[in-house]
Amino acid sequence: VPACKTTEDVNNCKDYALTDYHYATAKFNLDDAHEIAVGRCYTDSATAGFLLATRSVNYAVLRAAGEWKDKIVDAGLWGWPELRKIFMNAGFSLAELQKDEMKPLHQVDFENNKIEATAVLHKDHSGWAGLGQCMRRHSDVMFAPCVMLSLGCHAAGIDEGIPSCASRVMARGGVCFTGAARCPTAIATL
C-alpha cells in the first residue's frame, strides 16, 4: 500500500510527511475512530526481501532449531526493563551477549557482531537513520530471526531514507520490526 503524501511541515523540513490515514477504515468497531491496519515487508533490496520472505515462512522451524529461541536482549540507552520482565515471566532469559542484566547493549555491542536472540527490546531516542545508542543504518550486525520492538521516537520511519535502521534489521536477519513510523511532533501523529 503506498503512503499518501500530506502537505504538512515536519520538524521544519519541507519534505512532505507521509501518512496511512487515508487508508484507514472508519467504524471498524463502534468507537468512531479510524483504524489503520497496514503492514509492510521492507528491506534494503530484492535479494534481502527474498531472504526475509524465506525466514518469515520458515520462522517456526528456524526458531525451534535455534539455541536462541528463548533469549532476549535489552538495547539502547535505557533498555526496556518493563517489557523484559514480561518476557522473563514467560520463560525467556537474557542472551549470552548481554552479560549484565542492568546494562543494555549499546552500539559497540552491535557493530560487527551477531545478536542471537528471538527478541530485541530497544528503548532510546531514535530516528530512521539511528537507533540512539544502539545501531546506525549501516551497521554490520547480523540477527538471528528475531522480532525487534522499539520504543524510540520514530524508529520505523522507513520512507525517510534508504537504508533505514528498520530495513537494515530486516535485511540482516530480523523477521519483524515494530516501532513508531512518525516523529511524535508531526501534526499527523498528534
Image (cartoon, helix red, strand yellow):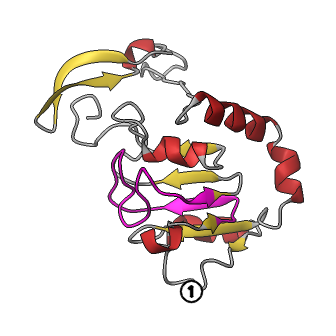
> Which residue does the image show at 62% across and 43% down from the upper left?
176
Specify the amino acid type for callout 1: Asp
Whether residue 86 can be seen here: no
Measuring from the top left, give residue 178's x and y in whole percent: 53, 44
- Magenta-colored span: 115-142
Measuring from the top left, give residue 109's x and y in whole percent: 51, 73
Measuring from the top left, give residue 139's x and y in whole percent: 47, 57
Q: Secondary structure at mark 1?
A: loop
Along the horizontal axis of the image, is 46 left or right of 131? right
Q: Residues within 10 Å of mark 1 (few under 14, many from 20)?
A: few
Image position of 97 with respect to 122: above or below: below
Image position of 158 with respect to 148: above or below: above
Along the horizontal axis of the image, is 116 left or right of 185? right
Q: Quadrant of residue 90?
A: bottom right
Nearer the observer, 84 or 140: 140
Nearer the observer, 66 or 102: 66
Does 159 lie within the magenta span? Answer: no
Q: Main secondary structure of the magenta part?
A: loop
> Which residue does the image show at 37% across and 67% down from the upper left?
133
Image position of 14 with respect to 146: above or below: above
Q: Which quarter of the rendering shows the C terminus?
A: top left
Q: Quadrant of residue 4?
A: top left
Q: Number of callouts in the render?
A: 1
> Which residue does the image show at 63% across and 65% down from the upper left?
114
Whether residue 97 can be seen here: yes
Nearer the observer, 13 or 92: 13
Q: Name the residue tied to disc 1.
A: 100
